[in-house]
Amino acid sequence: MATGLAVATSLMPVSWLAWTSGLATVVRVPVQPLAQAGVKVSHWLRPAADVAGESEALRERSDQLETTRALLHGARLQIDSLLEEIAVMQGVRSLRPGVEITPIVARVTGRPPDRAGGPVRINAGTRHGVVAGAIVVYRGGHLFGRVADGVSRLSSSVVPVTDGSIGLIEGVLLPGDDPVADVRSRPHIQFIADGRGGLAGDLDREVVINAGDTVLLADSSWPDSAQGLVIGYVWSVEPKDLQPLLNRVTVRPKFHGRRVASVTVIIERFTEPVGAGP
């Protein structure tokens, strides 16, 4: 019956339905206060246009502040790195008065895809004075590697010290708790790349060595200005199963090629020392 009434009502002329406005008013009376309260709550939860605009401006200023702060910290770190490199180069110059050393700072533009590492590409070449075989350092006192053959005009490749093509490399061990110990009385060890981003070598088990000890370059096949640079730090010392009188020593560089953004190429030019005779 209700359905029939609804159909019949819908077929009536509009003028016949004036009575429904009164019913709508009766229904709207209890509902309207609730609707008005909902509107007020929605306005309270949602800021007005001008307030929202102010919030957006504050967010933009906050983002700008964070960006500026990051740039400031980055610049300070770069300055500290350059000062460290300058100090190391000045020390090398004071020890070798007959050699003119020119540092060339270059950015790393290409990295090896494999985890173990490999040659990296830098944006410095013959135009900047880079030559094959030049040593490359990072943060002043850390040996990174050597410039590979085939230097182009604007770029070159650097072979990290942990790359297998470097071959054997000799270092001297310093205790971690005494980094200024006399290297002349410290044990030497030969390392070779272990294929996992580090170096490995064998050492007599009677030699006291601990994880964290420092390994400095002491290899006559490298340029004199590279001697004493940090190769890395002892990562592990484990006895060899088949050679019980030897320990297997693993060394890891502090800075890996995949994470280095810039390096310094050291260019040497031999000059006659002041006061040297013919």
Image (cartoon, grey):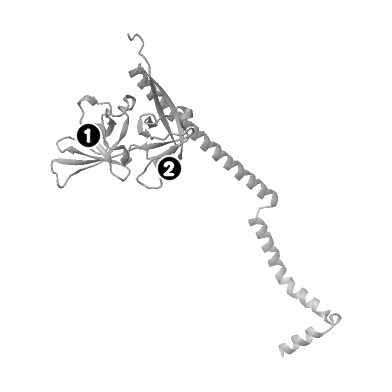
Residue at screen point 31% across, 24% down: 224
Nearest to the observer: residue 26 or residue 81? 81
Residue at the far right: name it: 15
Horizontal side of 249 relative to 67 (left or right) equals: left
Q: Which amino acid is tagged 1?
A: Ile
Q: Position of residue 148 (x, y in %)?
A: 38, 35
Mark 1 and mark 2: Cα distance apart in space? 29 Å
> Picture coordinates of residue 65 (x, y %)?
57, 39
Quadrant for the C terminus in the image: top left
Between 82 and 165, which is closer to the camera in this rendering?
Answer: 165
The residue that label 2 is drawn on is 111
- In terms of image quadrants, where is residue 34? bottom right
Q: Quadrant of residue 219?
A: top left
Q: Tell me, yes or no, if residue 206 can be seen here.
A: yes
- Taking the spot 48% from the left edge, 31% from the top edge, the residue there is 76
Label ID, residue 189: 1
Name the residue at the bottom extreme.
1
Helix, strand or loop status at disc 2 = loop
Is residue 218 toward the left or the right of residue 264 in the image? left
The answer to which of marks 1 and 2 sits earlier in the sequence is 2
Looking at the rendered image, the quarter that the N terminus falls into is: bottom right
Mark 1 crowd level (few <14, some 14–19, many ≥20, 10 Å Cα): some
Q: Position of residue 254 (x, y in %)?
A: 34, 37
Dot label at residue 21: none
Would residue 202 be found to the left or right of residue 94 on screen?
Answer: left
- Residue closer to the observer: 96 or 229: 96
* Amino acid type at image mark 2: Arg
